[in-house]
């Protein structure tokens, strides 16, 4: 299980904020992942903590990388 905090630092509403986990930087998307919430909206300055549950063995030894996209969202560089 992993907790992720997402923040909207911009001046506008972020819609359909979509989180995904990849197997390392530039790796394939980890599936299945059970998200507490996904495709949500964030008001300017709002933060939300979301929990992702997945099997550690499915990471195949790679470190999880969180990617964020959505409407009116600057796609994040993998971290």
Image (cartoon, helix red, strand yellow):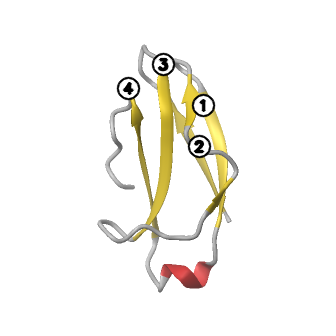
Q: In the displayed structure, would residue 66 be above or below residue 17?
A: below
Label 3's element? loop
- The C terminus lies in which quarter of the figure? bottom left
The answer for how far apart the CA atoms under marks 1 and 3 are is 12 Å
| Residue 72, image x, y percentages | 38, 26
Label 2's element? strand
Query: Given contact means CB atoms under 8 Å apart, are the residues at marks 2 and 1 in contact?
Result: yes
Residue under the point 35% across and 54% down: 78
- Please report whichever mark, 1 or 4, sits nearer to the chain's N-terminal start: 1
| Residue 43, image x, y percentages | 56, 19
- Please report whichever mark, 2 or 4, sits nearer to the chain's N-terminal start: 2
Name the residue beneath numbered marker 2. 5
- Please report whichever mark, 2 or 1, sits nearer to the chain's N-terminal start: 2
The answer for how far apart the CA atoms under marks 3 and 4 are is 7 Å
| Residue 62, image x, y percentages | 43, 79
Image side of residue 45 versus residue 63, left or right: right
Name the residue beneath numbered marker 3. 13
Which label lies toward us, 2 or 4?
Answer: 4
Query: Given contact means CB atoms under 8 Å apart, are the residues at marks 2 and 3 in contact?
Result: no
Name the residue beneath numbered marker 1. 47
Q: In the displayed structure, would residue 44 be above or below residue 57?
A: above
The answer for how far apart the CA atoms under marks 2 and 3 are is 17 Å
Residue under the point 60% across and 79% down: 56
Q: Which mark is residue 72?
A: 4
- Please report whichever mark, 1 or 3, sits nearer to the chain's N-terminal start: 3
The answer for how far apart the CA atoms under marks 2 and 1 are is 7 Å
User: Quarter of the image holding residue 65?
Assistant: bottom left
Q: Which mark is residue 73?
A: none
Query: Given contact means CB atoms under 8 Å apart, are the residues at marks 2 and 4 in contact?
Result: no
- Please report whichever mark, 3 or 4, sits nearer to the chain's N-terminal start: 3
């Amino acid at each position: 299980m992993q907790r992720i905090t997402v923040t909207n630092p911009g001046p506008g509403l972020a819609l359909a904020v979509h989180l995904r986990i990849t197997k390392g930087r530039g790796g394939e998307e980890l599936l299945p992942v059970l998200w507490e919430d996904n495709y949500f909206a964030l008001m300017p300055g709002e933060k939300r903590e979301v929990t992702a549950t997945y099997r550690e063995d499915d990471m195949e030894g790679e470190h999880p990388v969180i990617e964020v996209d959505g409407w009116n969202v600057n796609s994040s560089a993998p971290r």
